[in-house]
Image: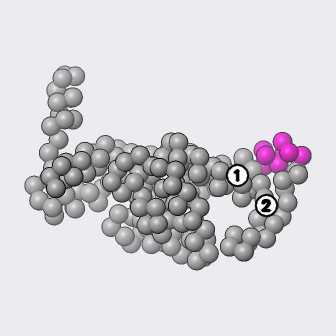
Amino acid sequence: TKETNSKDNTNFSLPTTLKDYLIFSRNFYSGFWVRFIAYIIDLIVVAALAGLLNTYSFGLLNRELYFPILGEEGLSYVVVMFSYFILMTYYFSQTLGKMIMKIKVETNKGTKLKLSDVLYREVIGRLLTIALFNIPYIVVAFTDKKKGLHDYIADTVVVKEDFSSIRRQMNEKIERMK
C-alpha cells in the first residue's frame, strides 16, 4: 500500500478544464472567520509575551508611546507583536493561532516565503491596514483567494494546511504546461 500511496501522489492529475480548477481551488484558501479566530489567538499570545517581557525587564519597557499609525501602545507590546508575527511567519509560515486553526501563509506560487515577503506582509501591509482602520481585513471575506491588503502587498495567500500540497502540485503542473 505504501507504493500505491506514493504513486498516487506523483500521478496527480489536474481538473479537466480551467473552470474545474477554479471551482476546486476555492477550497484551498482560508476564509475570514478562521483567519479572524487565528488572529485573536495570536493577540492573546502577544499580550502574554509582552507581559512576560515587562516582568522580566522590571517594567522598563512598559512605556506608553504614541505611534502616529498605531496610536498609544506599550513599547513592549509593539516590539513583541512585530517580532512574533515576523519570526513565526518567516520560520514556520504560521503563527500559533494559524497552527491551531490549521492554516498557513504561502507565496501566491506556493514557494517558500522569503524574508522580504514576510517584511512586506507583516510590517508594511499591517501598518497600512491599521492606518486604514483595519477595514482592509474585511476584504478577505470578498476576494476569490481570500486575500487581505497585506497579502496583496506581499503576494501571499493563507491556505488550509490540508490543501497546501495539492495546491503546490497543481501550480507546478500548470507552470510546466506553459
Determine whether, in the image, residue 21 is placed left or right of residue 112: left
Q: Quadrant of the C terminus?
A: bottom left
Q: Secondary structure at mark 2?
A: strand
Residue type at mark 2: give it: Gly
Magenta stretch secondary structure, dominant = helix
Q: Residue at the spot x=81%, y=66% of the render?
A: 65
Depicted 145 relative to depicted 136: above or below: above
The picture places residue 32, in percent across and down from the top left corner, at 45, 63
Give the extent of the magenta segment.
51-58
Q: Quadrant of the N terminus?
A: top left
Residue 132 in view of the camera: yes
Q: Residue at the spot x=21%, y=28% of the render?
A: 6
Q: Residue at the spot x=79%, y=70% of the render?
A: 66
Q: Earlier in the sequence, mark 2 or mark 1?
A: 2
Residue 155, image quadrant: bottom left
Compute the Cα span from label 2 to label 1. 10 Å
| Residue denoted by label 2 | 74
Residue 128, image quadrant: bottom right
Depicted 24 relative to depicted 142: above or below: above
Depicted 21 relative to depicted 114: above or below: below
Do the numbered discs 2 and 1 sit on residues whose CB atoms are within 8 Å? no
Q: Secondary structure at mark 1?
A: helix
Question: How many C-alpha atoms fall within 10 Å of the one at disc 2: few (<14), some, or many (≥20)?
Answer: some
The picture places residue 24, in percent across and down from the top left corner, at 23, 56
The picture places residue 13, in percent across and down from the top left corner, at 14, 45
Residue type at mark 1: give it: Val
Q: Which mark is residue 80?
A: 1
Determine whether, in the image, residue 29 is placed left or right of residue 33: left
